[in-house]
Amino acid sequence: MTIACKFGGSSVASSEQIQKVRAIVDSDPERRFIVVSAPGKRHDGDQKVTDLLYLAHETAKAGLSPEDIISKIGARFQEIVEGLGVDLDISSDLAEIQGKIGSSRDYAASRGEYLNGKLMAGVLNATFVDPINHIFLDGQGNLEEEKSYESLSKALSGEGRYVIPGFYAASPDGEVVTFSRGGSDITGAVVARSARAEVYENWTDVCGLLMADPRVVDNPRNIEEVSYHELRELSYMGAQVLHDEAIFPVKSQGIPIHIRNTNEPDHPGTRIVDKVKYRGVPIVGLAGKKDFEIIYIQKTLMNKIVGFGRRLLGIFESHQISFEHLPSGIDNLSVVVSTESMGKHRESVLADIQKILSPDEVTCFEGIALIAVVGAGMAFHPGIAATVLKSLAEEGVNVRLMDQGASELSIIIGVENPDFARALNSIYKAFIVD
């Protein structure tokens, strides 16, 4: 079973962590395709290598010498090299980076992965493959799928191990371009697909996904298996151990993603698959975020007015505001948006709604928290919504909004910001009995 692995910044932050990575890779000969991030923080107060590179870039752009910062980065890698006892000289690479650090922010940011890729190739006795030659993005930053998969597949077709730096690719003009933060997850997925891996292991510093945020709910259960669609719902509401875009390259090929903990390699972690079997509990997890707003519009005979919804959403589009949810009644419609996106546009949006739609009433309710109750097992399972509402009623939490799609994959509950923690805990306890 061929395995592609991605190791995040915390997994490669020091020589001690990289020794754990080496032990994990060595424990299974099928772990042949290794994607690495730049070294992350070793402890509180430490700096990520990528952040140092950003600082060096800004220093050079300001016309100052980045030499001291580059030296600090070099010392960080030298410490790792000496701790591992490998023979690697990156002085020429550092000199090149210092000379070009001010040229491009993306180039600067990518060099942590580049250097660490070279280091890990030496540690694992593997072939180094530079993504600048094999992973291509178009002018809009989208992956050129066919070209990238074909090129990378050829580069990874030999025997032995391969190490590929994460986070960056080639722009249409051949320059370095980076994915958004956490983009090494995407590289890992692209490598898994290109190498025709049967599993994509994503190694990090947590034991997979939990059924709720442990900062809000005490000791929530681990999620052993979750579907791609369920993960999308949970990730949208803030439950993230994986970059959103990392799902797509592997999903179409049916390659499962396995989230695992470098510091606890024997923990089962979380498997992300196409379809899951019924777990005995109808929900897979809860996730939520604060600071949303509900724009409530009432208009008599709204359902008879052709194009009302289109014109309403056109107002938000004209202000470059995307909506989150759109619950409605026969004579009313609510648009849920984030407070951040609404920002300074609030008064002008409300004024445009009055002017263009002439509603009987338009009201903005601020300070709303949204909670997503997610699980494929909810479909055709009677009483889920009743259980949710009963738990909130018993806790004295007022529900300001409730939205459920026909797929029954998730139920969205809106409560006041101050009620968020109580609401999340009450729903969790209603379904999970320890």
Image (cartoon, rainbow, N blue to C red):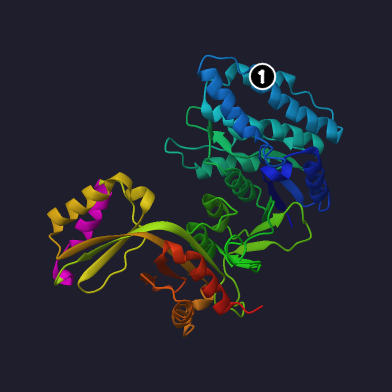
* Labels in figure, total: 1
Q: Mark 1: give few (<14), some (14-19) or many (20+) Cα within 10 Å.
A: few
Image height check: is 228 above or below 9? below
Residue tagged by mark 1? 68
- Specify whether 311 is left or right of 339: left
For the point 18% across and 51% down, the residue is 352
Q: 420 above or below 29?
A: below
Prevalent SS, magenta region: helix
Dividing the picture into quadrants, the one containing residue 149 is: top right
Left or right: residue 226 compared with residue 139: right
Where residue 63 appears, as percent x and y from the top left, is: 52, 14
Quarter of the image that includes the C terminus: bottom right
Where residue 425 sits: x, y (%)? 55, 70
326 versus 174 height, above or below: below
Residue stretch in magenta: 302-318
* Residue at 71% across, 41% down: 43
* In this view, 321 is above or below 86: below
Q: Does the magenta stretch include residue 30?
A: no
